[in-house]
Amino acid sequence: MVILKRPLRLILVAFLACLPLVSFANQEVDSLQVHEEATHEVAAEGHHEGGHAEPADLKSKIKAFINHHVLDSHDFSLTQDDETGENWGFPLPVILWDNGLQIFSSAKFHHGKEVAESNGNYYVLNHHDGKIYKTDATGTIHENEETGHPDNIRPIDFSITKTVVSIIVAAILMFFIFTGLAKSYAKNGGIASGVGRFFEPLVVYVRDEIAIPNIGEKKYKNYMSYLLTIFFFVLFLNIFGLTPLGINATGNFTITFSLAILTFLITNLTANKEYWGHIFWMPGVPKPMRIILAPIELLGIFIKPFSLMIRLYANIFAGHIVLMSIIALMFIFKSWIGSSLSFGLAFVLSILEILVAFLQAYIFTMLSALYFGAAVQEHHHEEEGHH
């Protein structure tokens, strides 16, 4: 511990010593502020009815980029040239239901800069929420003055977005990895081979450290398929979110909601009579208290999956925001000291995010197993022995 404390103190002292230098070296901020004041006037002229100008100053661009990063998207944008405005990436198919099936490439939107036409219908991609709205040929979006949200009609969207692509890729990877692992078991007499052997320790860990302790040896096999699926599905999506592709699947509220609903349905549909008996008529408690506790226990049925949903969503979403904000500091500082500190902090946080990716997959799986175990646990109470 003595050896570890000295480098830590040295790092802290060096960091504190560099803080004044960072503010002193960053002399370009004043010119940036002057540039911002000038560009605000230009940006204000770009607003029209329901429309929004592109962010002109650096801080607004950074904020827009972070917001775009955490939202789902209809295309993959890898790089962008600020001078020409040209983007490099690849589009994804847009599938809408609006007076019939409308299918076209998201390249028609030109990253939200143009109106897309399909069978006489016109659509625009709103920058602020990333959603598609139906418009006229001019692409005008009418906003509600009270809510600030567009009043335009939103067609039913079945598009293949970045989140959908990541889900499909995760499903394909899981299918081939674990199908190969199962075949290697049958072929080699229970010995793993190929790529699947790298995931075998995780499979064993989920079985021995999550499923059996929380569900029990009698009934854990009934839930192993789901627990393994949910663990690796969340893990793969979390890892995808750390790539430069800007995928934020598990930081998407609808994804975590869907996963929580599955745990909720499995828990309550497979629960035994004693589980429901403990909720509506808790044994070992005075009868007047049972009437009070029953609504609370019933509410707990819905609070448990809600906590699963919020925990995964909030941790992954916040991690993306913090990491992108720290990276953005390199462009704001514009000095070798500030940028170096931001880069070092971003690097350390990226390593931490890898740990968080595994940790959140473990927590979601462990709590699901805990709920399953409570639903199938057999209690033995002597009702007459309690008053």
Image: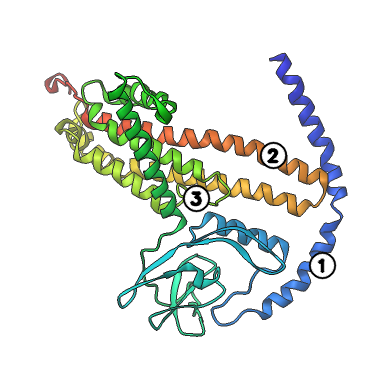
The quadrant in which the N terminus is found is top right
Place of residue 361 in the rendered image (x, y in percent of width and height, measured from the top left): 43, 36
- Which SS class for mark 1? helix
10 Å crowding of disc 3: few (<14), some (14-19), many (20+): many
Mark pair 3, 1: CA separation: 35 Å
Place of residue 14 in the rendered image (x, y in percent of width and height, measured from the top left): 81, 32
Q: Tag 3: residue type?
A: Asn
Residue at 11% x, 21% y is: 384
The circle on residue 126 is none
Q: Tag 2: residue type?
A: Leu
- Which SS class for mark 3? loop
- Which SS class for mark 2? helix
10 Å crowding of disc 2: few (<14), some (14-19), many (20+): some
Q: Answer yes or no: do the residues labelled 2 and 3 have beta carbons within 8 Å? A: no
- First of labels 3, 1 by sequence position: 1
Residue at 71% x, 38% y is: 344
10 Å crowding of disc 1: few (<14), some (14-19), many (20+): few
Place of residue 56 in the rendered image (x, y in percent of width and height, measured from the top left): 70, 69
